[in-house]
Amino acid sequence: MGQPSRCLKRPYRWRKKAFAAINNTAKLGEVFAFRSTIIKQHGEIDASVAWPDKRWPYLPAEEMAWRGASLSSIGTGEHFAGRLDVARKLLIEARAISEAIENWSFTRAIIGMLSAVYVEQGELHQAAALMRQTLAEARQQGDRDDVVHAQIGLMQLSYEWNALEAAEQQAREAFEIGEQLADDEFQAQAALMLAQIDHARGRTATAQQRITALLDQIQLQRALRLRWHARAARAVQARFQLVAGDLAAVQALGRCARTR
């Protein structure tokens, strides 16, 4: 995602100066927290977590919403930095705050981040339990975006556990909702999983066709947000070729990747 727009930066600077001038530290803390949230939404994780020293002293205990937002931002940064125990603690606290103020949409987002930490810590069943909770609540609320996020997490765990039927069902639902939402990233992740499931079932040609179609679609769209999915697809394609003993194809794929 791009840089935060100037139209967002200007009111941020104005409010910061105004609240500082009248020594309204509580509102100043809210401004810092809001700024951090906006930066994180633009994908600037390092920048967003550079604000805790500025915002944290100003946020009173009763400002639970902003404290929760700040904790989730810092927790995300700790996760990206590989400090999983710290991230876990912060996200658990952020989740408790979000549940206390009954902000269920934000709670599901935090649970998604927390489940990713559990996966990296090897606590897969704990992560799956959180994802299933999110899925059930998202279905009840009619939040299709969160349904897909949960299904993508669950399909990856199902595949890891060789529960291919469950993984396929989860991937197909994620792909279908991705189509309905016109979300290319959801579709790319689901298509990649379906290719891996085909390969695991011995349907190598079908798996290769899915990968080729996915890469062609990504190349056609040329969207920056899909670059990671293209790299992931090429890695899976190379693994398929290695299993087939086609070393020349793997080398060709490597040369192609280096030129992109």
Image (tube, rainbow, N blue to C red):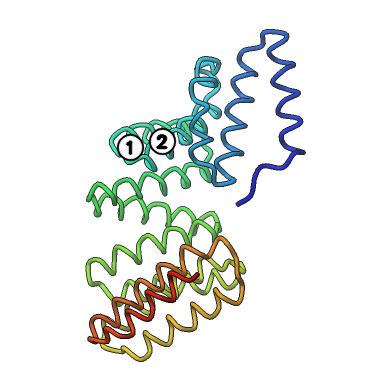
Residue flagged by tag 1: what amino acid is it? Answer: Arg
Amino acid under disc 2: Gly
Which residue was labeled with disc 2? 75
Estimate how packed mark 2 is, as few (under 14), some (14 to 19) or many (20 or more) residues with alpha carbons within 10 Å.
Answer: many
Residue in view at x 28 percent, y 69 percent: 159
Left or right of 88? Residue 37 is: right
Between marks 2 and 1, how big is the CA–CA gap?
7 Å
Q: Earlier in the sequence, mark 2 or mark 1?
A: 2
Could you tell me how many numbered marks the image carries?
2
Question: Residue at left 46%, top 58%?
Answer: 149
Is residue 184 placed above or below 132 in the rendered structure?
below
Is the C-beta separation of discs 2 and 1 under 8 Å? yes
Residue 235's spot in the image, x, y percent? 35, 71
Q: Residue at x 34, y 74 (%)?
A: 236
Residue 88 is marked as 1
Q: Eyeballing the image, is 222 above or below 85? A: below
| Quarter occupied by residue 83 | top left
Percent across and percent down for residue 15 are 73, 22
**Which residue is at a point 52% across and 42% down the rendered structure image?**
106
Q: Nearer the viewer, residue 126 or 202?
A: 202
Q: Secondary structure at mark 1?
A: helix
Q: Is residue 98 above or below residue 142?
A: above
